[in-house]
Amino acid sequence: MKLIRWGLVVACLGLGLLAAAPETHDYPRQTPAPTASFSPTATPSPLPVWDRAEELEEAVEVNGEVIGWLVVPGTEIDGPVTQSRDNQYYLTHNWKGERDLWGSYFGDYINDFSSRETLSPNNVIYGHSYNREDPTLPGFTQLFAYKEISFLRQNPCFYLYLSNGEELVFQVVGVFYTDTGFDYINPRPDREEKLDYYAQVEARNLYLLDGITFGPEDTLMTLSTCAYAYDTEKAGDQRFVVLGKLLEPGALPLTLEIRKNPDPLGPES
C-alpha cells in the first residue's frame, strides 16, 4: 500500500513542473475568505465563520465524490475537496470529474472524512503547485505563503467543512520541506516509530512554536504539495507540508510565540 501511495503522489510533481498555465477550476459560487487577524501576543478573538454549506451541497450534487470544502484564510484556497478509491484520478480531473491538468484538491483514499470521529491520527489533502513556489499563483502554490512568519501569525488556522455539516478547525503546528524518504503521511502504529514521526516534524519545522503541543493523542490534517526549491537534481520526490492540529468544537486558537527555526532539517536530511 505504501508504494502505491508514494508512487501516485510523485505523479503530482510531474504536472507541477510545467510552466504556469491558466487556472481552469470552476467552483460553485462563493465569497472570498477574508484574512483572519491574529497576533501572537494578543488574546485570540472569536474564530471567523464562513458559511460554505450551500456551496458544498451544490458540489456534492454535481459529484458524489466531493467530501468537503477547504478554506485557507489569506489565500484563494477555497473550494471542494474530492476523494476517489485511489490517489490517481483527481491528479488529472477537477472536482466535477472533468479532465483537468491541475486536478482537484483531494483527500488521501486511505482516510475517512465522513465525520470528526472517523478521522485518522493524520489525514492528508493533496493539491498541485507551480514550480516557482510563488504564493500569488493558483492552487496549493499559495501554501508557500506560510514560509513568511507574518502570514502564519495572521492566519493561524485553516478550515475543512464536511458533507455531514461539521466545521473542522485546524491550528497550524508545522510548516516544512521534506522528501518522500520521511513518511510524513502515515505515522506507523508502533509507538516508537510514531514518536519518531513527531520528532521529525519538530526538527523539520520552519518555526519554533511556544504555546502549543501535538502528539499521538491529537488529530492532524496535512496539506501536501510538490516542492522544488531544494530539488536541484529534479528527482521529483520533495514536498512542502502545512500541518494542522484539530481544535475542539468551539475552541479558539491558542496564543503562540512564533520564532523562526534557525536550522531546520530539509529534504534528504
Image (cartoon, rainbow, N blue to C red):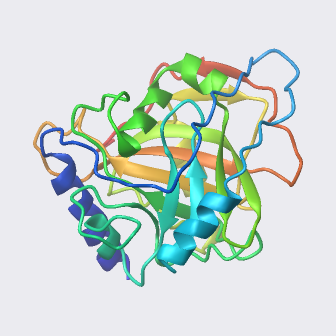
Q: Count the numbered circles shown.
A: 0
Q: Would residue 165 be found to the left or right of residue 17 on screen?
A: right
Question: In the rendering, at what x and y percent does residue 58 appear?
Answer: 57, 67
Of 268 and 84, nearer the camera is 84
Tell me: residue 36, above or below residue 58.
above
Determine the residue positioned at 33% across, 57% down: 181
Question: In the rendering, at what x and y percent does residue 178 appear?
Answer: 37, 45
Question: In the rendering, at what x and y percent does residue 220 appear?
Answer: 64, 56
Determine the residue positioned at 50% across, 63% down: 81
Task: Residue lying at the far front in this picture: please name it.
Answer: 29
Residue 194 visible in rendering: no
Determine the residue positioned at 71% across, 54% down: 215
Q: Quadrant of the C terminus?
A: top left
Q: Would residue 106 be found to the left or right of residue 198 on screen?
A: left
Q: Quadrant of the N terminus?
A: bottom left
Q: Would residue 127 be found to the left or right of residue 39 on screen?
A: left
Tell me: residue 136, above or below residue 16.
above
Question: In the rendering, at what x and y percent does residue 98 appear?
Answer: 29, 70
Determine the residue positioned at 30% across, 78% down: 4
Residue 22 visible in rendering: yes
Tell me: residue 33, above or below residue 256.
below
Q: Would residue 73 be found to the left or right of residue 43 on screen?
A: left
Residue 52 lies in quadrant: bottom right
